[in-house]
């Protein structure tokens, strides 16, 4: 940063000297022409830097917006999955109790049948 400041100060001083020469209609040397060219390129790079920073900021905002919408969508889908899992667990619990009840009934009938067979036979 410090070196850039030194360069910018030097370039500004030199370009002001060249500008004074132009105002006085003095002939420009090769070095003066190079100073003008460097100053133009420096300004061009500065504006490109501003444009690039703006584009990056816009892109970051766009990407953040997309991630936020994906996050909301994911949370909604995850919430739906959790509700579906609760529903399936409740059904499985109900079926498990029915199965246990049915097995108990069958065991009772089987034991009663064994008693009848033992009693008759």
Image (tube, rainbow, N blue to C red):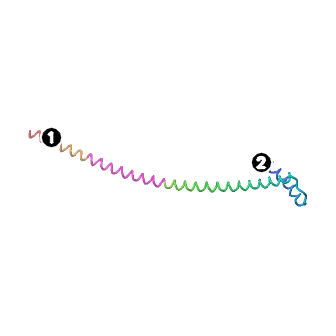
| In this picture, residue 37 sits left or right of residue 64 | right
Q: Position of residue 68 (x, y in %)?
A: 54, 55
Residue 92 shown in magenta: yes
| Measured Cα–Cα span from mark 2 to mark 1 | 101 Å
The residue lying at 37 percent from left, 52 percent from top is: 87
Q: Nearer the viewer, residue 111 or 62?
A: 62
| In this picture, residue 20 sits left or right of residue 79 | right
Looking at the rendered image, the quarter that the C terminus falls into is top left
Q: Which mark is residue 53?
A: none
State which region is magenta. Answer: 74-100
Find disc 2 in the rendering and name its residue. Answer: 4
| In this picture, residue 95 sits left or right of residue 42 | left
The residue lying at 71 percent from left, 55 percent from top is: 48
Give the vertical position of 59 relative to 116 (above or below). Answer: below
Q: Nearer the viewer, residue 100 or 74?
A: 74
Q: Position of residue 40 (x, y in %)?
A: 78, 55
Q: Position of residue 36 (x, y in %)?
A: 82, 55
Residue 37 shown in magenta: no
Q: Which mark is residue 114?
A: 1
Main SS category, magenta section: helix
Q: Residues within 10 Å of mark 1 (few under 14, many from 20)?
A: few
- Residue situated furthest front in the rendering: 30
Q: Nearer the viewer, residue 22 or 11?
A: 22
Q: Residues within 10 Å of mark 2 (few under 14, many from 20)?
A: few
Q: Position of residue 33 (x, y in %)?
A: 84, 54
The residue lying at 80 percent from left, 51 percent from top is: 8
As helix, strand or loop, the secondary structure at mark 1 comes to helix
């Amino acid at each position: 940063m410090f070196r850039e400041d030194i360069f910018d100060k030097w370039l500004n001083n030199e370009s002001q000297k060249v500008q004074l020469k132009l105002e006085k209609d003095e002939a420009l040397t090769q070095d003066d022409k190079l100073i003008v060219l460097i100053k133009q390129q420096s300004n061009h790079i500065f504006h490109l830097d501003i444009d690039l920073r703006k584009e990056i900021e816009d892109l970051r905002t766009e990407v953040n917006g997309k991630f936020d919408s994906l996050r909301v969508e994911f949370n909604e889908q995850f919430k739906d999955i959790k509700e579906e899992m609760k529903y399936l667990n409740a059904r499985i619990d109900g079926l498990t109790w029915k199965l246990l009840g049915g097995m108990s009934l069958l065991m009772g009938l089987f034991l009663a049948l064994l008693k009848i067979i033992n009693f008759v036979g």
